Image (cartoon, rainbow, N blue to C red):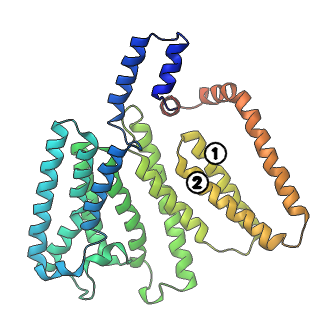
């Protein structure tokens, strides 16, 4: 539910609240909104600038930095981190919560670069062909040192500053670990054969389940505060759905089961008010229906007719649900644990 100035003015016009109460209420909502991410020009500038700075030290790092050597990379990383922490503290003291969180996140994103420099300085890097810029583009087990260090740093900084955006590098690092850890479990020379691809897809799927479960636990724990679970849900669902979709099967029953899982994801997304479940669940459902249309029923004129009937049936179910939603959800929530009831109540306010 979104409350706009126009909706408050309508409430004033209908004498639900007074004109002064409307002004005070709108001012209150404006003050509250500055602490939560929103699609405003100010917030776009915040995140655009922050992501450019983070990208400069991660995705867009070029080979020119290698000439500084390990010790030089460490020094520059610590210098940048000091500036980032100084800005985070200064902005936090001025109550600029979102830019302060972005600056703290920038510090966490410097961790793999600092660890890479430290390893280069001590001569511990066994692969002379590997350079830092490949960290975000290639899968290697060597990155695990950097990822574990980033994970620890991210947890410490998140504990210190408690900004939701700090969960982003933690979630990304967990996702990277799920991919790079596979390299320790398989023969690297055969990493692209069909068996290994299936294995990597399964690892991604199960890791995604674990990350999504972690996100749900975080969601419950933070139900009265900020949204700390968003990034964990995002990368957990991507890892799970990507691993699930990448698996191959000739069984139509398995494909139908895949379709059912995606439908459950849509329902789960609606229940938890998490769009990422709905988006990927809808994509998977469309993939399955596309498979039916192009392979199973490619010569059947009845399939589009049946699909149209199913679609209209879903619309009818939506109408029925709208009429009975309050009654059904009230009965369903009565049997849920109290923390989950509170979480759902907070989501639907």
Front in this rendered view, residue 49 or 322: 49
The image shows residue 81 at horizontal and vertical percentages of 15, 58
Residue 151 figure quarter: bottom left
**283 vs 160: above or below:** below
Helix, strand or loop at label 2? It is helix
How many neighbours does mark 2 have within 10 angstroms: few (below 14), some (14-19), or many (20 or more)? some
Left or right of residue 254: residue 144: left
Name the residue nearer the viewer: 147 or 6.
Answer: 6
Q: Are marks 1 and 2 in contact (CB under 8 Å)?
A: no
Mark 1 = which residue? Answer: 267
Q: Secondary structure at mark 1?
A: helix
Residue receiving disc 2: 279
The numbered mark, 1 or 2, whose residue comes first in the sequence reads 1
Pick whichever, 205 or 52, lies toward us. Answer: 52
Q: Nearer the viewer, mark 1 or mark 2?
A: 2
Left or right for 194, reference 44: right
Q: Residue at x 57, y 46 (%)?
A: 269
Q: Nearer the viewer, residue 180 or 50?
A: 50
């Amino acid at each position: 539910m979104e409350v706009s100035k126009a909706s408050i003015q309508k409430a004033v016009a209908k004498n639900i609240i007074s004109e002064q109460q409307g002004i005070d209420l709108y001012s209150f909502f404006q003050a509250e909104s500055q602490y939560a991410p929103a699609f405003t020009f100010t917030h776009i500038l915040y995140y655009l600038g922050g992501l450019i700075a983070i990208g400069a030290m991660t995705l867009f790092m070029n080979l020119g930095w290698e000439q500084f050597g390990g010790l030089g990379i460490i020094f520059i990383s610590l210098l940048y981190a000091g500036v980032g922490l100084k800005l985070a503290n200064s902005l936090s003291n001025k109550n600029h919560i979102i830019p302060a969180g972005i600056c703290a996140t920038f510090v966490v994103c410097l961790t793999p670069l600092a660890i890479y420099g430290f390893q280069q300085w001590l001569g511990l890097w066994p692969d002379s062909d590997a350079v830092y810029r490949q960290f975000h583009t290639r899968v290697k087990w060597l990155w695990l040192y950097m990822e574990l260090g980033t994970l620890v740093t991210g947890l410490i900084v998140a504990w210190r500053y408690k900004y939701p955006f700090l969960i982003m590098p933690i979630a990304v690092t967990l996702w990277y670990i799920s991919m790079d850890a596979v390299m320790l479990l398989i023969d690297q020379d055969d990493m692209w054969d069909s068996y290994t691809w299936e294995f990597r897809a399964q690892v991604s799927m199960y890791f995604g389940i674990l990350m999504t479960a972690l996100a749900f636990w975080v969601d419950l724990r933070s139900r009265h505060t900020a949204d700390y679970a968003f990034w964990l849900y995002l990368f957990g669902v991507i890892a799970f759905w990507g691993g699930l979709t990448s698996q191959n099967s000739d069984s139509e029953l398995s494909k139908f089961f895949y379709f059912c899982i995606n439908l459950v994801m849509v329902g789960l997304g609606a229940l938890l008010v998490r769009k990422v479940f709905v988006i990927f669940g809808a994509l998977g459902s469309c993939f399955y229906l596309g498979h039916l249309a192009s392979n199973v029923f490619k010569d059947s004129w009845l399939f589009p007719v049946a699909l149209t009937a199913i679609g209209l049936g879903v619309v009818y179910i939506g109408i029925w649900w709208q009429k009975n939603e309050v009654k059904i959800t009230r009965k369903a929530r009565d049997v849920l644990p109290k923390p989950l009831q509170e979480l759902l109540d907070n989501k639907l306010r």
